[in-house]
Image (cartoon, grey):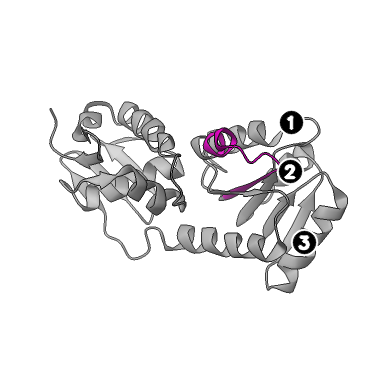
Amino acid sequence: MIWCVEDDAGIREIEIYTLESTGFQARGFADGADLQKALSSQRPELIILDVMLPGKDGVTLLRELRADPATRDVPVIMATAKGSEFDKIQSLDLGADDYLVKPFGMMELVSRVRAVLRRCRSAGEGEASLRWEGLVLDPEARAVTAEGQPVALTYKEFELLRRFLSRPGVVYSRDQLLTDVWGVDFAGETRTVDVHIRTLRQKLGGYGSCIQTVRQVGYRWKGKT
């Protein structure tokens, strides 16, 4: 089930019609209050979230979705009339999986939805647990523990750590991480990788120092310094 949060009834109805005509189930919401009410009893496969909403705006709702353990892994595509690099970076930094800049075509919307769902569904399938000393990452349970204690990571932080632990010592460029984890490949937005690396290091405690910065290139996982 794909949920579309859009205050313009005309746009919302077109989104729902397009998604349903291409094989998805879809449901629409006019504002954040309706969305939050529905989330109390259901969980969608993906949310298309407009930024400019009455009451709570989309950015505030995205923050709340990512802060709640029950919804932090739900894929979110932001829809915004703002096309500046800053707005795109902000959405990615807050945990959005992709974004659409209005006006966008309905077939583009369907393509983005399919790509995000494919990326999220494939993450962790058939993968064994990854270990580094007392740090354990379980891809199927999407859980991380350090010395037996749970470490709460966002979807993006989890995916970054999964890549590092799967290939210790390999240097990942910022562009490569942005493409692999966020699914975007344009230049000028690699700052979002640095932001997530910083928070990941903080959450990993003593293991945070295993993520080493390779000057002018990117990052790699290596032993504690």
Residue count near mark 3 (Cα–Cα under 10 Å), binned few <14, some 14–19, many ≥20:
some
Q: Is residue 43 visible?
A: no
Residue 15 lies in quadrant: bottom right
Mark 2 vs mark 3: in front: 3
Which numbered tag is attached to residue 220? none
Labels 2 & 3 near each other (Cβ < 8 A)? no
Which quadrant is the C terminus positioned in?
Answer: top left
Query: Which residue is depicted at the point 60% across and 60% down?
Result: 113
Residue 107 lies, with reference to residue 140, above or below; the image says below
Which numbered tag is attached to residue 35? 2
Magenta stretch, residue numbers: 76-91
Between marks 1 and 2, how big is the CA–CA gap?
A: 11 Å
Between marks 2 and 3, how big is the CA–CA gap?
A: 15 Å
The residue under label 3 is which amino acid type? Ile
Which numbered tag is attached to residue 16? 3
Which numbered tag is attached to residue 56? 1
Residue count near mark 1 (Cα–Cα under 10 Å), binned few <14, some 14–19, many ≥20:
few
Query: Which residue is depicted at the point 41% across and 34% down?
Result: 191
